[in-house]
C-alpha cells in the first residue's frame, strides 16, 4: 500500500510540474509581447536590427608602434525607438592600466589605450573628453536625437600604440603586427536589452551588428597585408 501511495504522489508531482510554464526572463517576455522575438527561436514579425556602413583607413608603419586611423560611420536606426545617447566600443582600452580584466596583465601587454583625436556628428565637431572613455565603452550624447528609420553620420580620428605582447592581437615582432579590434565601433542596440554597455574584460567574445565595411590599410613599401 505504501508503495502505491508513493507512486501516486510522484505521478501527481510530475503532472503538476509539467503543467507549470518555464520561467521566462522579464526582458525576453517583453520582447515576445512586442512581437520582436518568438518562443521557438525565430525572429518575430516585428523583429529588427540596426546596421551601419564603416569606411575605415588605418596607417601602420613598423617598427613604429603607433597605429593611426580615421573612419566614417553611416548608422541606420531600424528600431522603433528614438536614440539620444550612443555607446561606442573602444576595445583597445583593455590594454590600459587599471581597467577591469579577467586576469593579470604583464607590462608588455599594457599601453595608454585609445586616444580619440576628433569626433564628428553629422559633420559637426564634438568636444570629447578622455573621461568619457576610461574603459572599453565611450558614452556619446547626440546633439540631435536619431529618430526611427533615420541615418546618422559619425566620424572618428584616433590613434593607439600596439601592445608588445601578442595574443588575440599585438606585436609579433618589429616587422609583424597582428591588428584586431582596432577601430571605434557603435555598440549593439537591440530589442530586449537596449545598448550593450558591458565592458570587455579580455575573456569573452563580442556582440556585433551585421555591418558593411570598407577598409584601407597603409603600410611601408614591400610589406604584405593580410585582411
Image: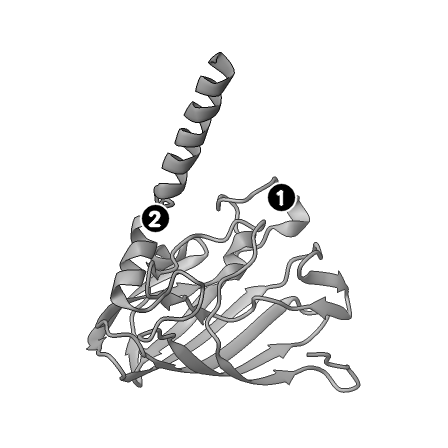
Tell me which residue sits at (76%, 62%) in the image: 172
Residue pointed to by mark 1: 105
Relative horizontal placement of residue 178, taking residue 124 as reference (left or right) = right
Q: Where is residue 2 in the image (x, y as percent from the top left)?
A: 48, 12
Q: How many labels does the image show?
A: 2
- For marks 2 and 1, the one nearer the N-term is 2
Residue 101 screen position, x and y as percent: 54, 44
58 relative position to 149: left or right: right
- Residue closest to the eye, 3 or 35: 3
Which residue is depicted at the point 29% across and 50% down?
26
Quadrant hosting residue 83: bottom left
Colouring: one colour
Q: Which of 122 and 117 is in front in this view?
A: 122
Using a 10 Å C-alpha cutoff, classify the residue at mark 1 as few (fewer than 14 neighbours), some (14 to 19) or many (20 or more).
some
Where on the picture, by quarter, is residue 78? bottom left
59 and 91: which is toward the camera: 91
| 16 lies above or below 70 | above
The answer to whether residue 104 is left or right of residue 148 is right
Check residue 25 in the rendering and tell me which mark sits there, or answer none. Answer: 2
User: Quick one: SS at disc 2?
Assistant: loop
Quadrant containing the C terminus in the rendered view: bottom right
User: Going by the image, does 119 lie left or right of 183?
Assistant: left
Image point (53%, 83%), residue name: 213
Q: How far apart in space, not on screen, are marks 2 and 1 (Cα)?
A: 36 Å
- Residue occupying image coordinates x 66% and y 61%: 169
Neighbor class of circle 2 (other Cα within 10 Å; few <14, some 14-19, many 20+) is few
In this view, which residue lies farthest toward the top? 2
Amino acid at each position: 500500500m505504501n508503495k502505491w501511495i508513493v507512486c501516486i504522489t510522484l505521478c501527481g508531482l510530475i503532472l503538476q510540474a509539467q503543467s507549470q510554464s518555464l520561467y521566462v526572463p522579464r526582458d525576453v517576455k517583453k520582447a515576445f509581447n512586442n512581437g520582436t522575438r518568438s518562443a521557438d527561436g525565430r525572429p518575430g514579425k516585428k523583429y529588427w536590427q540596426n546596421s551601419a556602413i564603416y569606411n575605415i583607413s588605418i596607417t601602420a608603419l613598423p617598427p613604429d608602434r603607433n597605429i593611426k586611423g580615421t573612419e566614417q560611420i553611416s548608422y541606420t536606426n531600424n528600431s522603433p525607438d528614438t536614440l539620444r545617447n550612443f555607446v561606442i566600443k573602444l576595445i583597445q582600452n583593455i590594454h590600459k592600466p587599471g581597467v577591469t580584466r579577467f586576469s593579470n596583465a604583464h607590462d608588455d601587454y599594457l599601453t595608454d589605450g585609445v586616444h580619440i583625436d576628433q569626433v564628428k556628428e553629422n559633420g559637426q565637431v564634438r568636444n570629447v573628453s578622455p573621461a568619457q572613455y576610461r574603459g572599453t565603452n565611450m558614452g556619446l550624447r547626440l546633439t540631435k536625437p536619431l529618430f526611427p528609420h533615420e541615418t546618422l553620420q559619425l566620424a572618428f580620428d584616433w590613434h593607439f600604440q600596439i601592445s608588445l605582447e601578442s595574443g588575440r592581437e599585438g606585436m609579433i615582432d618589429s616587422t609583424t603586427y597582428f591588428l584586431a579590434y582596432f577601430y571605434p565601433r557603435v555598440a549593439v542596440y537591440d530589442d530586449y536589452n537596449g545598448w550593450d554597455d558591458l565592458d570587455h574584460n579580455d575573456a569573452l567574445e563580442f556582440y556585433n551588428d551585421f555591418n558593411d565595411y570598407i577598409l584601407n590599410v597603409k603600410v611601408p613599401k614591400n610589406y604584405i597585408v593580410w585582411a
